[in-house]
Amino acid sequence: MSDDTWAGTSLPDRFADEAYASVKGYVRTHVLHQQLLRHLPPAPARVLDVGGGAGHQSFPLAQAGYDVTLLDSSPAMLDKARQRLNRLPDQARQRVTLVQADGENADEAVKGARFAAVLCHGVLGYQEHPELLLDQLCRCAADGGLVSIMTGNARTMAVRPALERRWDDALAAFDTRTETVPGLGVRGRADTVEELSELVRRRGVEPLCWYGVWLFVDWLEFCGVELDPGDAEQVAATVAVELEASQRDPYRQLSRAFHLVARKLPSFSRGVARLGVASTNRASVRHA
């Protein structure tokens, strides 16, 4: 997403202050956080959040003791990140570094540093050709480090228009990968778990598991149901159900987004893996 999308508009405030203050925004942050904690090494491991926006995902990690670098291309969003950073306790603030750069130039922007975990949540879908960004995500991860990607689920594109009773749009959505993102006015693109797994595997990063993100809260929103973020008991119950659904079939398959967690292989293993892929490809050609 270009800087112009955010600059000179109220979008940074709406996105950072309003969207994440909703029950749906809280569900996204909390569910992803719990999923990450299952795989992250102990603090103070280094974490790079590519396209991290206002820090909603990475600042809780800083508060948990992790050394966080938040990289974003938008000066407007980084301003929001600074505002939110000032609200954190001193110790957590000292563990956060903000960097302005495109994700496609992440390696250069962090001066070749390698991280125990590289996060990229809600960014890949804005890339028409995501290969360059994936190169950078996988390159910035240390050997044995995690690569965590959240992106739209291409297999549920018909859900939103169907629940909004836009039947012609829903019918067309079964065979499309893109949609206009509400509130932003830009086109978003979705992926499948299998395709994204293969793309990172080609870059020496082995998928470990995947989770769903946003199921029932999405369906309720599309049906016009408003959830009260001030009802703490209801929010906690909602999060518990969403977290459970995120790791169970068939529920996770129906989520509008998915979260892929993968681990970068050591250098030697990456070389062997690439040889294996090449051999498989050659065998396929010969068989064909």
Image (tube, rainbow, N blue to C red):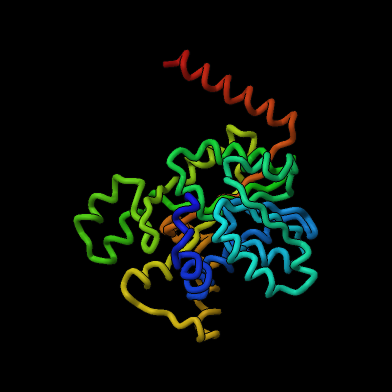
Residue depicted at x 37% and y 71%: 221
Instruction: Residue at the far left: name it.
Output: 168
Give x and y (percent) for residue 169. Answer: 23, 55
Give x and y (percent) for residue 256. Answer: 42, 58
Residue depicted at x 49% and y 81%: 229
Q: Name the side, left or right, on which 189 lies relative to 82.
A: left
Q: Name the side, left or right, on which 220 lies relative to 194.
A: left
Q: Is residue 144 visible?
A: no
Question: Where does the C terminus fall, quadrant-wise?
Answer: top left
In this rendered view, identify the residue nearer to me: 52 or 117. 52
Q: Name above or below for residue 192 compared with residue 64.
A: above
Residue depicted at x 64% and y 43%: 106
Give x and y (percent) for residue 15. Answer: 48, 67
Instruction: Residue at the far front: name it.
Output: 8
Q: Name above or below for residue 233 compared with residue 131.
A: below
Q: Is residue 170 visible?
A: yes
| Displayed quadrant of residue 269 | top right
In this rendered view, identify the residue nearer to me: 96 or 216. 96
Residue depicted at x 57% and y 41%: 104
Q: Name above or below for residue 130 compared with residue 56.
A: above
Give x and y (percent) for residue 147. Answer: 63, 47
| Displayed quadrant of residue 40 | bottom right
Q: Name above or below for residue 153 compared with residue 251.
A: above
